[in-house]
Amino acid sequence: MKNHLTLTTLLFLIVTKSFAQNKTPEEFIPEGYVLFEKSFGDLNSDGVEDCILLIKKIDSANIVQDEYRGELDRNRRGIILLLKNKDTYTVAVKNYDCFSSENEDGGVYYAPELSVYANKSKLYVEYAHGRYGFWKYTFRYQNSDFELIGYDASSNYGPVINTETSINFSTKKKLTRKNTNEEADSGEEVFKETWSKVEIEALQKLSEIKDFDELSVHDY
């Protein structure tokens, strides 16, 4: 009986490992999803190019007809972060539907454009909103997840910056820069800087974010 249990445990570990590691990033895309975008970069400071997968759900129920834009795929998008070790990949974090579709309604302007990329061993989730500015989330791989350690945003009127916000969640400090020159052209802004403390009990984990559109980081 003891040998039988040992063999069963061994088989379980082999099967579990086969699901946790694969040789190509595409093998990690779950059933019912397709690859939306793939990029590479070091995510954990080991000098190895890891992989970022953006995936998109396949569901005909989320294909809609817009009066002006025609047929739109409103299926949500998700992310899978893969760490590379030699010739295999391992899932670090996955979140299958934290991003809205690329076909959302932007109102009087187009919807913000999502970019997800790695730089200097950090993960960035950035939304560019043309002449209105941008906002960006910075994550670092720690505590077996990617934790939100920073937030940066710029509110613009065309090329002129109205306000800039930078939050460091690790140090719990927030910097707000407000343009006080109402007649400024681009480059002529005069900023008033204000520092404040951020009240936060724990760092937000990427795996637990249900919807990036609902994050109220700028309210801190």
Image: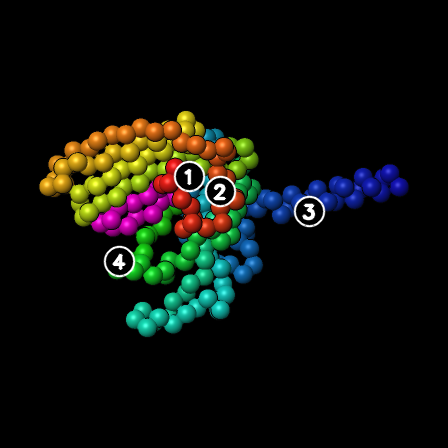
Task: Say whether marks 1 and 2 touch (CB < 8 Å).
Answer: yes
- The span from disc 2 to disc 4 (Cα, nearest Å) is 28 Å
Dominant secondary structure (helix, strand or loop) of the stretch shown in magenta: strand
Residue where numbered disc 1 is placed: 123
Q: Circle 1 — which element?
A: strand
Q: Quadrant of residue 184?
A: top left
Residue where numbered disc 3 is placed: 15
Residue 91 versus residue 61 in the image, above or below: above
Horizontally, residue 153 falls left or right of residue 186, namely right
Mark 4 nearby-residue class (10 Å; few <14, some 14–19, many ≥20): few
Residue type marked 3? Val
- The span from disc 1 to disc 3 (Cα, nearest Å) is 30 Å
Residue where numbered disc 4 is placed: 109
Residue type marked 1? Leu
1 or 4: mark nearer the eye: 4
Residue type marked 4? Tyr
Mark 3 nearby-residue class (10 Å; few <14, some 14–19, many ≥20): few
Q: Magenta span covers which residues?
A: 121-136
- The span from disc 1 to disc 4 (Cα, nearest Å) is 27 Å
Residue where numbered disc 2 is placed: 206
Q: Residue at x 33, y 38 (%)?
A: 152
Residue type marked 2? Leu
